[in-house]
Structures are given as C-alpha cells and as structure tokens.
Amino acid sequence: MKLKSFLCSLAIIFSGALLLNSSALARLACEPVCKSEAKSAFQDCISECREVFQQAKDSCRNIDHVCAEDCRALYDACIVEPLSDLAECKLPCNTSLVNAATICRTEFSRGTHERDMCIDQAQIVAFACKDNCREQFQPALTLCRKAFKECILNNCKLP
C-alpha cells in the first residue's frame, strides 16, 4: 500500500513538472485523451489515499475497517434523499438570486453604490432562503450521522 502511495506521489509531482513546461501544457491542451487519462489517474490516487486514511483512522480507533465501510455505505445511502431534497429546495433561491442580480445590473450603472446595494440585498435574500432550506433538512442529516455513529459503536468496535 505504501508503494502505491509513493507512486501516486511521484505521478503528482511529475504531472506538476510537466505543467510547468509550456510546450507540455500546449500538448495536453490538444490531446483530450491524455488529459482524460491524467484526470482518471488523479482521481484514482485520491480514492486510494482516502482508503488508506480511513483504514489508518479505523485502526487508531480500534474499529474493524470492513464493518466501518458497511456503516459508511449505509450513511451514504441515508444522506442521498435529504441532500437531493436540499439541493431541490435551494434551486429557487439560486434562480431568484440570478434574476434579481440581472435586474440590478439592468437598472443601475456598473460601479455605482446603488447597484452594489441592490445585489447585496439580493444575496441576503438568497442566503436566508438557502439557510431556511438547510434548517429544514438538517434534522434528517443529523439522524443519518447519529445512525452512522451508532452503527460504528455497536457493531465495529474491536475487543
């Protein structure tokens, strides 16, 4: 596992060195397959590092890693609906902000205090709207976190 982490580190360092070379950057911009492969390799490295981190964390906490992974899967399944509902709730907030900011830009000249105040007010309204959404769906997310903790504590502790 340490070898994979080392190789991922080398790949990231090498990728950074290539990006500093302007001719390499130009070639990457022209070769979408190369860019796609690099992105995939980067995401694989992140996934492997996350897995190594979770294994180490579980070990430090004296928790069975396989059991903890099952609890994490249950947690991930639990939060899907509340997060989807939260995103759906926030959508009109974001749409209203875009529409209000567009009106502000139409009504007031660029760089004026009035335009800034108009957009600030639209942002405040959007923030309050999104905050109400967060408050609405927070209890469901809290229940998911509580179930996750109970799953870990009741099922995964090693003797």
Image (cartoon, rainbow, N blue to C red):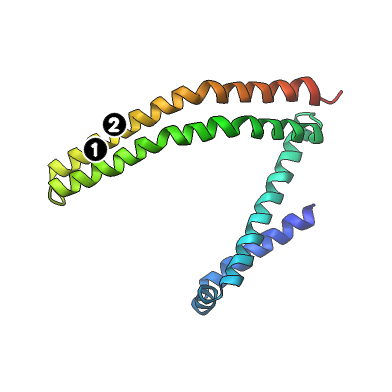
Local SS, label 1:
helix
Residue 11 position within the rendered picture, expressed as x and y whole percent measured from the top left? 66, 64
Relative to 157, residue 30 above or below = below
Foreground residue among 155 and 52: 155
Marks 2 and 1 close (CB-CB < 8 Å): no
Q: Going from the N terminus, do you reach mark 2 or mark 1 first?
A: 1
Q: Viewed as shown, does residue 73 lie left or right of 141?
A: right
Q: Residues within 10 Å of mark 2 (few under 14, many from 20)?
A: some
Q: Residue furthest bottom?
A: 23
Residue 155 position within the rendered picture, expressed as x and y whole percent measured from the top left: 80, 23
Apparent side of residue 138 relative to residue 154 in the rendered image (left or right): left
Q: Quadrant of residue 60?
A: top right
Q: Which residue is mark 2?
A: 125
Residue pointed to by mark 1 = 120
Name the residue type under label 2: Val
Q: Quadrant of the C terminus?
A: top right
Identify the residue at image location x=30%, y=44%: 98
Instruction: Tell me which residue sits at (74%, 25%) in the image.
Output: 152
Q: Is residue 113 above or below residue 15?
A: above
Residue type, mark 1 in image: Asp
- Name the residue located 50 percent from the left edge and 32 percent from the top edge: 85
Q: Which mark is residue 131?
A: none
Q: Position of residue 156 (x, y in %)?
A: 80, 26
